[in-house]
Amino acid sequence: MVKLLQLVFQGLSLGSIYSLIALGFVIVFKGSGVFNFAHGEFVMGGAYIVVVGSGRLPWGVAIGVSCAVLVVVALVCERFLLRPMLGRPLFAVIMVTLGLSIMARALAAMLWGVTDRGNAAAPIGRNVVRIEGVALPWVGIWTIATAAVVVAVLFWFFQHTHYGLAMRATAVHQEAAAAQGIDIRRMFALSWAIAGVLAVAGGIFLGAFPRQVGPSMGFVALAALPAIIIGGFDSLPGAIIGGLAVGLMQVVGSGYLGDFGGGRFHEVLPYLVMLAVLAVRPFGLFGSHDVERV
Amino acid sequence: MTTSGLIAETYRQELALRRGRAAHAGTLVVVALAVSWPLLLSAQWQTAGVFALIAAIAAMGLHITTGLAGQVSLGHAAFVAIGVYSAVWMGVDQGWAWWIWLPASGLAAAVVGLFVGPFALRLRGLYLAVVTVALLSVTQYVWGVWPDLTGGFNGRSAQRWDVRGHSLFSELDVFGIITLNGNQLFWFVCLAILTVMAIGARNLQRTRPGRGWAAIRDRDLAAAVAGVPITQAKVSAFVVGAFFGGIAGALLAAFQSYVVPEQFGLDLSVRYIAIIVIGGLGSVAGVIVGSFFVTILPLIITSLTGLLPFISERPSTSGGFTVDLASAFVYGLAIVLVLVFEPRGLMGLWERFRDVWRTWPWSR
Amino acid sequence: MTESLTELPSPAVDRSGAPLEVRNLEVGYSRLSEVLRGLSISVPRGGVVTLLGPNGSGKTTVMRAIMGLLVLHDGEIRRGQVLLDGADVTGIDSGSMVRRGVALVPEGRQVFATLTVEENLRSGAHTQLRSFGRVGRGEVADTFDSVLDRFPLLADRRRQQAGYLSGGEQQMLAIGRALMARPRLLLLDEPSLGLAPKIVEHIRDVIVDVNTEGTSVLLVEQNAALALGIADYGYVLESGRVVLDGPAAKLLANDDIREFYLGMSAGERTNYRAVKHYRRRKRWLS
């Protein structure tokens, strides 16, 4: 029982990270119609800047710098790479973001080398809290708490501010939104900027103990893909639920199915579940049908 | 009266693959280049050339699945891997001859393609793309937990290719005129296979199934209404594409002689997509051009290291430009630039040039 | 539907209708096609003007060109001017147009299906809110209340998702959303499309009301009888050009209009010459 609770907690903790990453993907997709395959590299970049920055600056300031840099990078990408691609077929847009991710990975290795760089959430430390014999690492608590706060802020933003409403309107129908005087280009940019901040949040905890910040982080972030599919591409609640589900599957799976299927079954389990979900609901659990702008 | 090459005057001309004197001259030039490449360039370039040919075969398959039929597939590397490991199993473990393992690898991949195809029936666009990534990950997992076949993490050695007792890696004396080394032999063999498959792909475009693919790429609902058999078309797109991938995999196994499962991941799939995009979607020649561009790029950058002092040879732990990283960066940049500025790729650039040339002085 | 000409009202003190003038507009899409070929229309201050014409004549393109929405469809204004209250607003973005007091009720309604009725209305007031505000502040709240007064059906369904409303209710919502911007010029693109006659009457009354309060109206319609019943002046478009225009009463009495748009034939066609004559007339000037 203790083991189960511990695994569930770890699963939720990892799942929170996947949720943050998945939210980044989904917000960009809903807000600007682009699926940014390079988001994993944004996450990696955010983590790197925090780790490298916290060598010389206080940790909080390093986080702020990282957010600022990621927002600028996201806005530049949106403005100069994706906006000219407006109206082009989906395939071409996917490829641009893939090209971007290749460039970003090479750039990161050029700037910071190819070895791992350490813990992005070092100030939190490695201590654990013990409740009834269940060990809850502080990192995990912070991860879940941060994710919860971020989700709450996003919810408030989208439901109760007029910019959030404008973004939602743009996501539903771009032309009608423009007819109301909404500057849809600004809405695109805003969605990318939000994704940039989410990338930093996800990156910090992805690169925290027991993991490290390293050049392969982009691939780990790709594990958020099944989360997005399970939840549905254009659903924010779906991204959160999908992320938590994938995290739980991976951790609880590795705990109980450790010997099954060669010891790595838990890695492939989310993908199998994803295929199963798609077999029943081809647009994910919460996705809507007109995902493509035909 | 001479034909300008723009108009077909007989039905035979209409059907021909190349039209006009300029086009035939162009073909001769290409043939000359193809024959002379391995003979005139150094070993490094010969090796790169063979890799480029093999990549072209694989990318040709992706061209059919994604470029022709519009089924976005980011999992093409899986088919290549299946080709590799089928060839290895048949060639090394079972010891069968090349004329068995080569086509059979293609067939093995095609059979797997048969199972992937149905996904395309229910899913479209982005969902299909991500599902193909998932299927690729599943195959990666399978290779990882099947060390008998793949050698696990560390990989295993692959076969030597023996034709009538003569290994393709050793030298061959051709009619006493010249001696070809292993790389050069491989080049010509792969060139032959590529030529056959490329002509096949080109002709497929013009047959009924080929037109069916083009229809489902553009608007599959309308195609269905017009009578195109959607199920067969979508599944066959994957099957044929997979076959090409499998053949490429078998060739890769023979040439590389040591294969590691890690090399058949998302990076490789992206590389194939980059090839067809940079070369120019919808064009068989584009696939070949793109393949050479992508494969030769690191070599070009290496030769430029003499000129650019800040690019060093080996990766370091603290950063700095290296050949690998610089070529990766340029590779990504090329993809982005081509897509943003010239959506029809290198062939598109060539076509623009050619149109200006043809219609001069009335070109704008 | 034989209501006489609406009298031009004296505009309300705080919100006078804006006059619109379009001069020689040439518009095309994708750098290829030519949809509007030198179009000129004008809407007087506080007046109601209608644009009639068959499908494909360019009516929606006129609306898009005025509102600055062409860029979303890869279209462009190649020549000509759009003047709002004397100021040149040719090709400016839709946000600026809305701030200058022009609002569009798009063809097919285009409500935000997954947002609630209330959220749809709030989105119409986007340009009125200066910062992170909510409905409940000052003028926007007043406008919101007045829109709900005008459309009691919407008030009942405030929290429902707009996608679940019927066609007529969605049309009310689209008009209400446009009114949230307190427009001086209201553009309506085929508001009666696909609606039952009773609802069309209700919408007609709404348009007349809005105009009575001072807002100028430009109404694109295929239902000529409805449009000419409300309008002061009308233009007939075919293939991107105005082929006929005049006061609404005169258009209503015009033989060709009666035959081709109102379905009242001028007489029996008894011989082949009469059929040829009909066909020739039908081709208009385009």
Image: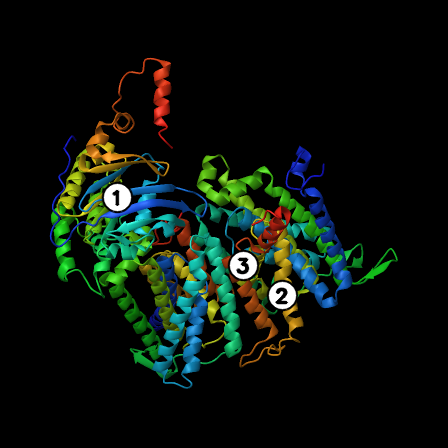
- Look at the image and tell me in which quarter the N terminus of chain B lies: top right
Letter of the chain that mark 1 sits on in the rendering: C
As measured in the structure, the alpha-carbon distance from the residue carrying label 1 to the one carrying label 2 is 61 Å
Please give left or right for residue B81 compared with residue A2 in the image: right
Amino acid type indicated by mark 3: Val
Q: Which residue is mark 3?
A: B338
Closer to viewer: mark 1 or mark 3: 1
| Mark 2 vs 3: CB contact within 8 A | no
The front one of A36 and A212 is: A36
Q: Are marks 2 and 3 on the same chain?
A: yes
Circle 3 Cα neighbour tier, 10 Å, few/some/many (<14 / 14–19 / ≥20)? many
Query: Mark 1 belongs to which amino acid?
Result: Ser
Task: Kindly check if marks 1 and 2 are in contact, taking CB atoms under 8 A apart as contact.
Answer: no
Answer few, some or many: residues within 10 Å of disc 1's Cα (few below 14, many 20 plus, some between 14 and 19): some
Quickly name the residue at label 2: B297
User: Residue B34 location, x and y as percent?
Assistant: 73, 55
Q: Is residue B218 above or below residue B51?
A: above
Does mark 2 fall on the same chain as mark 1? no
Residue at image mark 1: C42
Sequence order check, earlier mark of 2 and 3:
2
Q: Secondary structure at mark 1?
A: strand
